[in-house]
């Protein structure tokens, strides 16, 4: 006697679950330009690798000791493989009561997080859920005091494995917080929104009528840095998830994945010799420098619309994954404001947690100044980034492209661990800019001169004449001035040295504690 009858019944009930909220609900979901959770999983997985956990969890209709219908839980959980590596995931099913908590069965999301933690594999959230609902009160027959005990696991998970959140619909309440409890997140243009509470709740609380788009679409949440990246459509969003994970190890105990390089490690791009203008007031596009130095087409930018004075992302150098940052002089002169500082902290913490060497292309005029920045707390923000960098232990290399001034300029350097610095001939710097510092340090000389403006210009010219990087090099204040075209070969050499250090740093707790 076999158990074929029960296996056949399992298959039948699994087919019920695959119908999700039913044909009409799925059609309505598609009409709004969105994929179903199962279609999303198909994009996430290497074909044929999806293993579902809890497939028939749901509310069954029994008749004469048999199941005649099954309303599945409004989430799908399991594992897939991405580029051959196992990844755990959970996905909200908006076709069943909008993914709200009152339609949940068990704690499938929490189970998936625990699975990822115990198996030491990355975790992906495919978010499309509205969070809590007052219907829950009626369902359980009482109200309750809110609690966040479940987020303990979410926070712990981030210390050990890569966590990614893709916002693929309207996300509110706890799922909105989960959208940020990760190392990388992305939302979809025109179809995704994130907010603490939806339009109806906002109207009840404030009296203000507002659409969900005006409350929390990409115009709000990508610009303010709540969501790091923006995707053109859901396929693009999930492709970005896959690409982000490709640079990271499965967990903090493993080395980041190294691939066979297809780019010449000794490549010397002629364009680099003129990449930085001789006129210090002229701007340039730092991404062109990144393209000329990093492995071709390997740079994956993170947060391009937030803190735009600094470009951040992941890339490869001779096949090795690295974190990358560069000042962007087009935005605020490249100076570090609070947003650029927060963005930099995120990258440093990511690199420290998952043992990625950090590469900085520096052109830092200093912390952003002015009353607006002071009112926002630029000094406190500056102290945070100073602390984060000095506590980091990942191998760190800096190529100084142009200027370094003040405390923010000093962040190009770290006094502990493997650190290396190279300066282009365009390098200049100091505790403060000559133009601003002259008016302070020589105030009396300028005021007492017959022609104050001419005197100021004379002093500035005298000081500029001694700002050559060669003078610093003579005093060994600069270790190496390099031909810019040597940047890639020297970077390859550094990363090869860095990997010896990376192998000794595997495991948790070697860097700063990650904060979302």
Image: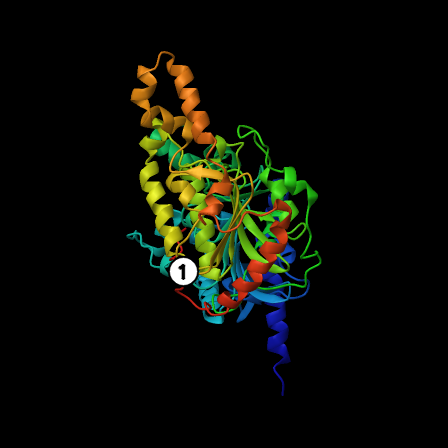
Please give the name of the residue rendered at 49% of the width and 43% of the height, measured from the top-left corner: 227
Q: Is disc 1 placed on a helix, strand or loop? A: loop
Q: Is residue 6 left or right of residue 172?
A: right
Tell me the colour scheme of the image.
rainbow
**Tag 1: Cα neighbours inside 10 Å, few (<14), some, or many (≥20)?**
many
Quadrant of res 505 = bottom left
Q: Position of residue 514 (x, y in %)?
A: 40, 55
Q: Is residue 79 left or right of residue 365?
A: right
Front residue of 359/39: it is: 359
Q: Position of residue 98 (x, y in %)?
A: 50, 47
Give the quarter of the figure containing the N terminus: bottom right
Please give the name of the residue rendered at 46% of the width and 63% of the height, measured from the top-left corner: 113
Which residue is disc 1 drawn over? 511
Whether residue 392 appears in this view of the structure is yes
Q: Position of residue 224 (x, y in %)?
A: 45, 37
Please give the name of the residue rendered at 32% of the width and 21% of the height, measured from the top-left corner: 445
Quadrant of res 330 = top right
Please give the name of the residue rendered at 31% of the width and 54% of the height, measured from the top-left corner: 147
Relative to 458, say whether 251 is above or below: below
Q: Residue furthest front?
A: 474
Front residue of 367/235: it is: 367
Q: Position of residue 166 (x, y in %)?
A: 53, 50
């Amino acid at each position: 006697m076999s158990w074929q009858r029960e296996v056949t019944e399992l298959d039948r009930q699994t087919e019920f679950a695959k119908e999700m909220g039913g044909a009409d609900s799925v059609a309505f979901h598609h009409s709004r330009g969105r994929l179903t959770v199962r279609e999303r999983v198909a994009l996430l997985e290497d074909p044929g690798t999806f293993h579902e956990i809890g497939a028939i969890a749901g509310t069954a209709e029994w008749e004469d000791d048999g199941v005649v219908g099954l309303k599945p839980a409004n989430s799908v959980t399991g594992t897939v493989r991405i580029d051959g590596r196992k990844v755990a995931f959970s996905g909200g099913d908006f076709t069943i009561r909008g993914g709200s908590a009152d339609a949940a069965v068990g704690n499938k999301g929490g189970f998936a997080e625990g699975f990822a933690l115990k198996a030491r594999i990355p975790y992906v959230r495919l978010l499309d859920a509205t969070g809590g609902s007052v219907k829950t009160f009626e369902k359980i027959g009482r109200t309750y005091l809110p609690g966040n005990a479940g987020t303990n696991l979410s926070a712990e998970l981030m210390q050990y494995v890569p966590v990614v959140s893709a916002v693929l619909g309207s996300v509110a309440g706890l799922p909105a917080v989960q959208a940020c409890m990760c190392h990388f997140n992305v939302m979809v243009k025109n179809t995704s929104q994130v907010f603490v509470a939806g339009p109806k709740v906002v109207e009840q609380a404030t009296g203000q009528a507002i659409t969900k788009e005006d409350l929390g679409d990409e115009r709000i949440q990508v610009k303010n840095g709540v969501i790091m990246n923006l995707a053109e459509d859901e396929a693009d969003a999930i492709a970005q998830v896959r690409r982000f994970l490709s640079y990271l190890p499965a967990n903090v105990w493993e080395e980041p994945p190294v691939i066979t390089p297809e780019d010449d490690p000794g490549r010397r791009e002629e364009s680099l010799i003129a990449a930085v203008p001789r006129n210090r007031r002229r701007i340039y596009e730092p991404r062109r420098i990144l393209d000329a130095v990093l492995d071709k087409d390997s740079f994956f930018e993170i947060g391009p619309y937030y803190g735009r004075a600094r470009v951040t992302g992941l890339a490869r150098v001779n096949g090795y994954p690295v974190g990358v940052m560069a000042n962007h002089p087009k935005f605020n002169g490249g100076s570090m404001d609070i947003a650029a500082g927060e963005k930099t902290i995120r990258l440093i913490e990511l690199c420290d947690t998952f043992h990625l060497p950090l590469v900085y292309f520096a052109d830092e005029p200093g912390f952003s100044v002015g009353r607006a920045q002071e009112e926002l707390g630029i000094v406190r923000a500056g102290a945070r980034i100073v602390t984060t960098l000095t506590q980091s232990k990942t191998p760190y290399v800096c190529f100084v492209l142009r200027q370094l001034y003040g405390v923010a300029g000093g962040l190009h350097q770290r006094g502990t661990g493997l650190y290396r610095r190279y300066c282009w001939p365009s390098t200049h710097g100091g505790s403060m800019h000559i133009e601003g510092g002259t008016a302070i340090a020589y105030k009396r000389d300028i005021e007492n001169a017959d022609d104050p403006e001419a005197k100021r210009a004379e002093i500035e010219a005298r000081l500029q004449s001694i700002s050559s990087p060669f003078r610093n090099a003579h005093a060994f204040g600069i270790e190496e001035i390099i031909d810019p075209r040597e940047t890639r070969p020297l970077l390859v050499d550094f990363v090869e040295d860095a990997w010896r250090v990376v192998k000794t740093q595997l495991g948790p707790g070697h860097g700063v504690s990650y904060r979302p």
